Image (cartoon, grey):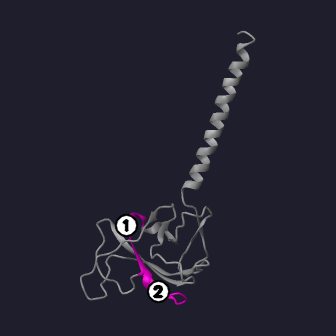
Amino acid sequence: MTPLRQPRVLFVILCVALTTIYLTWWTAYAKVHQSERFVPLPAGRPLERPDLTLRVISVAQAAQLTASDGGEPARPDPGTVWVVATMEVVRHAEDVLFICSPTLVSTDQRQWSTNTPTTTRALHCESDAVVTGQPYRYEAVYSVPTRAVSTVAGVALLDGSDVSRTPLLTPPG
């Protein structure tokens, strides 16, 4: 190899190595920050933010949901069960609307959004009914695969604008 070609070859090898290191770092960084990260709060402890306080009262599974108006009970799809999280929210800020859709989270980071059953529930959530400064109790209903119901870890309010860990709420005791 001529003396002039050797620096070019070394420069190409250096560029390939630096590009590989950069892409590996960026992939690891993106993987960590693209998925939601959760930090469990102690059992029964509420999520306290300037705009609201949210507490999980209970989380239970049900094979069917009874209707508050005496109608037909709602049954889940085959292979799933209902998971009902009873929660209490206190809105602190008048100008912030509370959205009644916390996410159910499993121990392996799977997530389920609320499901609207075909039956009327007594404790359904209406965002407009959440009055500032007054506790509002409601139920969030999720359809969860039967094989995954034992992995349910808690409830979280996802906030895509915040990169910090999301608090995971669990019921007391």
How far separated are the C-alphas under marks 1 and 2?
27 Å
Whether residue 64 is situated above or below residue 136 in the rendered picture: above
Quarter-wise, where is residue 138 in the image?
A: bottom left
Asked whether residue 144 is drawn in magenta, I would say: yes
Q: Which mark is residue 146?
A: 1
Judged from this view, the residue extending furthest toward the right is 3
- What's the amino acid at mark 2? Arg
Q: Secondary structure at mark 2?
A: strand
Q: Residue at x 57, y 63 (%)?
A: 161
* Image x and y of residue 122, in percent: 36, 87
Q: Say if mark 1 contacts mark 2, CB within 8 Å.
A: no
Q: Residue at x 58, y 45 (%)?
A: 27
Give the magenta part as a residue range.
Answer: 126-148
Crowding at label 1, few (<14), some or many (≥20) Cα neighbours within 10 Å?
few
Q: Residue at x 47, y 69 (%)?
A: 103
Q: Is residue 173 visible?
A: no
Q: Nearer the viewer, residue 117 or 132?
A: 132
Judged from this view, the residue extending furthest toward the top is 2
Quarter-wise, where is residue 1 in the image?
A: top right
- What's the amino acid at mark 1? Thr
Q: Nearer the viewer, residue 63 or 166?
A: 166
Nearer the viewer's eye, disc 1 or disc 2?
Answer: 2
Quarter-wise, where is residue 43 in the image?
A: bottom right
Whether residue 54 is situated above or below residue 156 in the rendered picture: below
Q: Which residue is mark 2?
A: 137
